[in-house]
Image: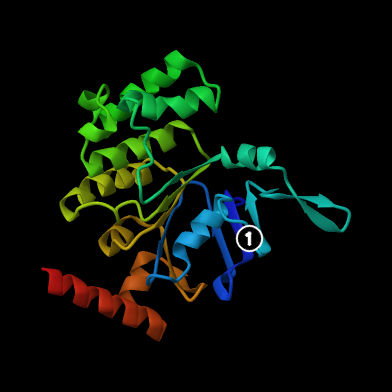
């Protein structure tokens, strides 16, 4: 197998007395969709935030295409990179958050294209053509001239995803991209993620949508208490969970779904 796009090695992260990540290791390969599941407080969101260098790690190491993230080697030790160099590394990844973080004063088209033009220094006409094609692909071509306040939550999140895709990242990170949406809007966002997975986009998706994880993931990761408890194919994790903790988590989730329906 080729070298991983993203490699997480024995990463630790603490918030005061709470150890959010406790020696987590994970590799994500080209074209792979890795879905991270687990209870609230298990460290899922912290994992992708650390991978994107939004949170500094307290131990271990992160690599993107073999390049050490956040630090440089100096003699026998490590030194932190400058914020500017960290920002340059971060440009090679895209992250989509729970909240949409769109600019309210920009149209949909400008929200999608602004970073690609100003930050990534790409040609405006090329970016706008690609953005128009992308908006068509996600069903928002007729909203290009609208402003965020004129869109539903699901539409806003699709715009945020389009913006992330247009940056041409090596890997996309999603932190509970549907958690802020009304239930009836979740499927339209998940449809975009399914399309990205089908076209070979390298992704790590933190989600509580078990059906999505089961149907779309190449590999599922179950976290609890800041550790990876199990990982494997969706068939393995959902069909034959090895640990009592995963069995309990899936049982609780099924009970919650049944109570809602």
Compared to residue 2, the image places residue 60 above or below, namely: below
Can residue 1 be seen here?
A: no
Compared to residue 21, the image places residue 179 above or below, namely: above
- The residue that disc 1 covers is 57
Q: Residue at x 36, y 35 (%)?
A: 162
Q: Quadrant of the C terminus?
A: bottom left
Is residue 261 rendered to the left or right of residue 16?
left
Q: Residue at x 33, y 29 (%)?
A: 134
Can residue 206 be seen here?
A: yes
Q: Residue at x 26, y 74 (%)?
A: 253
Is residue 140 rendered to the left or right of residue 127?
left
Q: Residue at x 21, y 32 (%)?
A: 150
Which sits in the foreground, 219 or 186? 186
Q: Residue furthest left?
A: 261
Q: Position of residue 170 (x, y in %)?
A: 53, 41
Is residue 81 rendered to the left or right of residue 24?
right
Which sits in the foreground, 13 or 206? 13
Tag 1 secondary structure: loop
Q: Position of residue 227 (x, y in %)?
A: 52, 73
Q: Write down the quadrant of residue 224 in the picture.
A: bottom left
Which sits in the foreground, 107 or 122? 107
Compared to residue 112, the image places residue 191 above or below, namely: below
């Amino acid at each position: 197998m080729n070298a991983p796009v993203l490699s997480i090695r024995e990463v630790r992260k603490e918030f005061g007395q709470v150890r959010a990540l406790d020696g987590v290791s994970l590799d994500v390969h080209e074209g792979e969709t890795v879905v991270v599941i687990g209870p609230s407080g298990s460290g899922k969101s912290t994992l992708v935030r650390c991978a994107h260098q939004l949170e500094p790690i307290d131990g271990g190491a992160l690599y993107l295409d073999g390049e050490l993230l956040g630090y440089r080697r100096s003699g026998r030790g490590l030194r932190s990179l400058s914020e500017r160099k960290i920002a340059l590394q971060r440009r090679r990844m895209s992250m989509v958050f729970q909240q949409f973080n769109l600019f309210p004063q920009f149209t949909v088209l400008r929200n999608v294209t602004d970073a690609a033009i100003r930050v990534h220094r790409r040609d405006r006409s090329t970016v706008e053509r690609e953005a128009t094609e992308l908006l068509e692909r996600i069903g928002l071509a007729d909203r290009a001239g609208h402003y965020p306040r004129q869109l539903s939550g699901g539409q806003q999140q699709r715009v945020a995803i389009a913006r992330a895709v247009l940056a041409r990242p090596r890997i996309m990170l999603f932190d509970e991209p549907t958690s802020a949406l009304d239930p009836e809007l979740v499927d339209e966002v998940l449809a975009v993620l399914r399309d990205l997975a089908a076209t070979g986009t390298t992704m790590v998706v933190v989600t509580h949508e078990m059906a999505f994880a089961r149907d779309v993931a190449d590999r599922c990761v179950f976290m609890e208490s800041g550790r990876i408890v199990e990982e494997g194919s969706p068939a393995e994790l959902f069909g034959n969970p090895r640990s009592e903790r995963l069995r309990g988590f899936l049982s609780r989730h099924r009970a919650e779904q049944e109570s809602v329906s």
